[in-house]
Amino acid sequence: MKILVLSDSHRSMAGIYHAIDTQKPDHVIHLGDLMEDAEYASMVYPTLPICMVPGNCDGWTSAEAIKQITLGGQSILLSHGHLWGVKSGYDRAYAQARAVGADILLFGHTHQALCCQLEDGLWVLNPGSSRSTYGVITLDEAGISCSIHPQT
């Protein structure tokens, strides 16, 4: 299973469309800022599953700010990251991911890509801003692999 991970698109749809068209993922995760961009993408790609969470620039919403999902047998904890204060460090995000038994932790907010660090058994990915980068996670019988890709 190939999962495309995007964040911080801020109304720049070109990066989202380019990443989807290039990677041809099985699933897309959008980590907020702006969640509306993911909603537009779901209209353009109606058969592509897109999971999303709101960011600090998404205004009032009743959408869950932190979600735990399972894809390809892996537990994934995702949030924009602002509620964990990721611009000041990742400790709160790591602690919550470990507390819920997540295999993979995804967040954005910093606009700086963090490529698949393995922290004591926890995979961590920040795809950066979809205007410049995006992340790809592959889940298969070999396990978990992930990478950061520049927008071209």
Image (spheres, rainbow, N blue to C red):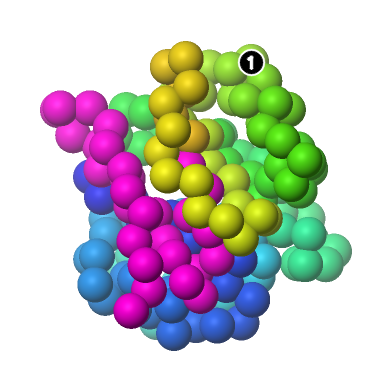
Horizontally, residue 115 falls left or right of residue 139, namely: right
At 51% across and 53% down in the image, what residue appears? 113
Where residue 67 sits: x, y (%)? 61, 40
In the image, residue 51 above or below residue 105: below
Q: Nearer the viewer, residue 151 or 37?
A: 151
Q: Residue at x 37, y 28 (%)?
A: 74
Total number of numbered labels? 1
Q: Position of residue 111 (x, y in %)?
A: 61, 60
In the rendered image, residue 110 lying in the magenta stretch gets the answer no
Residue 84: give x, y in percent of width and height.
75, 38
Determine whether, in the image, residue 54 is placed left or right of residue 72: right
- Give the position of the N terminus as an image quadrant: top left
- Residue depicted at x 61% and y 66%: 8
Q: Quadrant of the C terminus?
A: bottom left
Which range of residues does the magenta coloring cover? 125-152
Is residue 136 part of the magenta span, yes or no? yes
Residue that lies at the very extreme toward the left in this rendered image: 141
Q: Is residue 135 left or right of residue 55?
A: left
Regarding mark 1 in the picture, which secondary structure is present there?
helix
Q: Is residue 88 visible?
A: yes
Q: Which residue is mark 1?
A: 99
Main SS, magenta residues: strand
- Farthest residue toward the right? 60
Q: Which kind of residue does numbered mark 1 sit on? A: Ala
Q: Image height check: is 61 above or below 72?
A: below
* x and y percentages locating residue 2 in the rendered image: 25, 50
Above or below, comparing residue 104 to residue 8 in the picture: above
Identified at 23% across, 66% down, the residue is 24
Q: Residues within 10 Å of mark 1 (few under 14, many from 20)?
A: few
Q: Nearer the viewer, residue 81 or 86?
A: 86
